[in-house]
Image (spheres, grey):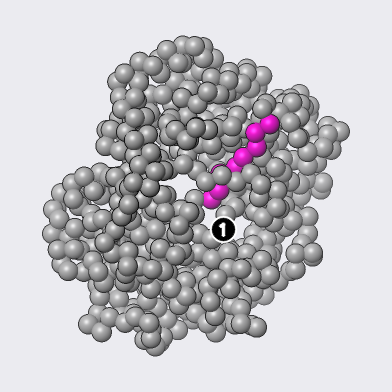
Amino acid sequence: MKLNRIIATGICTVLLLTGCSSSSSESGGFSVDVMNKKLLESAKALPKSQNLFFENGLEITGLGVTFDGRPKSFDGCYYFPAIESLMGAHVAIDWHEADGYSSTVAATLLSGKTDLPDILNPMDFGVMELAADDLIIPLDNYLDLMPNIVAAVGEERMDAWKSSDGHIYTIPSVSMIRGSFSTLIRKDWLAKLGMTEPQTWEDWLKYWRGVRDNDLNGNGDNTDEIPLALAGGMGGERSLTHLLNAFGIAASIDTQFCVLDDGTYTMVYEHPRYGEFLEAMAGLYREGILVEGYESYSYGSIEEMMGKNVLGSTMTFAASGAQTAALREAGVKDALWESVEPICGPHGDKMIPERELVSPMWCITAGAEERGKAEDIVRFFNWCFSEEGAFLYNYGIEGVSYTVTDGQPVLNRELVANGFADYRAVGINYEPFGGYWLQDAYMQCLFAGEKLENLNDIQKQTYNGLFEVNNDYFYVQPVTIETPCYVKYRTSLITDGVCKLRDKAIRGEITVSEFFAEYNKLKSKGISEIIESGKTYYEKIASGSEKQ
């Protein structure tokens, strides 16, 4: 069974939408604890892999970030004991929460190269910070030992794998699911306003004003509806991405960088439409379409608003059926969060970021290289991206969490009846460690046993958001090139500098002209260096002169 066959046929095996089924405690006796125990027992009994086994054993130590209540101990789920049985490799990660992780990394580095763990997740500490001090090793010379990883990344995304000096330093996590986010609008509120799906900027303005001015949730208060909410993040750097897109600005994941039509890599503030964007955002704020606190929303807070019958539109995860279900359970019988095409800007631009398919995950440290383990660690990760490794990551263990039917892996239906929740609770798709996430497994967690034509109206919105309405509008986000001057000035000139100025301009505390005047002062303090160094590196990549 070949991985490309599984990927190509992923849409053929579909399962029930997250949030639309019963919880595991109501699903006829399925138990996460029982499944976890069975997987652990089976993992410890797995035979040696015929593809790779370390006869003398391999101990891999690491420092990483966990989240979402994932197991932190070696035998907290099946995944690492299974790897040990299959490959003879014992993976011992010292897991930490994201808060304070950079300080943990800094404290670890004080021990010196010799005492570093074998692998390290850089997170916000920064890959280039580690590389500058020779604390991690470039992997360029090891590419011939990781053909599975190279194939998973793909030629068209090799630039996203490289760091700002042109070298590869990270073992990535790779996803085969292009879609993730979608524009969502209250279809029932559109109907109340006598409108259909907005097609132009003026249509969107009309809808947002309608949400603002009418008591669409019917609670007698026409001031508690919020027309639009978009998630922020990264200390205020990541803000209003979807509206930047509507003005033709294809921004990086942190919304700080873009590539102009002539191929120039620069900061978004240099884009010829950025001034127009700021004026429009200030106008939305004055009108009450963007409300106070717009810059601090998280995806969690947005989903909470979606389920509380106060929000009119957003851009969030396409798999948001639980919010429609919550509204209906609360008595809003006609409620429906509908996936629609991206917001159309005043010049007709429509675009939406493609999922970050290649994410940096693990650096191999200089300490591992000194201990003579780097090559084996690379071979280990390459196995994780093999068919055998990808099946372990995506499906668990055959006969326990999945079966093979007509040559295709089929996840236990009860395991995915609660969407991703139980699937991940037993350690499948162990995201803190990363791996090669296949579209088929993703689909099976979205839809349980139903053919596409049998999906209900809530399920269809998720499918449409992931695979239909956005297909013509995806763009690959430019990388944020972490040059030395970017690392040096990021906090003072970007996070606490231009981003704060941007929000002041949107809130009307300064004019757009004053924004650019202050921005130009920041350029002389280091922003220009960030732009020029990023541009220089990007030109090398674009011309193909930065060959490995």
Q: Main secondary structure of the magenta part?
A: loop
Specify whether residue 353 is painted magenta.
yes
Residue 533 seen in the figure: yes
Specify whether residue 186 is painted magenta.
no
Residue 304 seen in the figure: no
Of the 4 image quadrants, the one containing the N terminus is bottom right
Q: Position of residue 189 (x, y in %)?
A: 79, 37
Of the 4 image quadrants, the one containing the C terminus is bottom left
Numbered range of the magenta stretch: 348-355
Specify whether 68 is left or right of 383.
right
Q: Position of residue 16 (x, y in %)?
A: 69, 65
Q: Nearer the viewer, residue 305 or 492?
A: 492
Q: Say which element carries label 1.
A: loop
Q: Nearer the viewer, residue 376 or 447?
A: 376
Question: As displayed, is residue 469 above or below residue 94?
Answer: above
Q: Residue at x 74, y 26 (%)?
A: 202
Q: Residue at x 40, y 78 (%)?
A: 82
Judging by the rendered image, the residue that carries numbered circle 1 is 177
Question: As displayed, is residue 100 above or below residue 455?
Answer: above
Specify whether 142 is left or right of 294.
left
Q: Residue at x 75, y 68 (%)?
A: 451
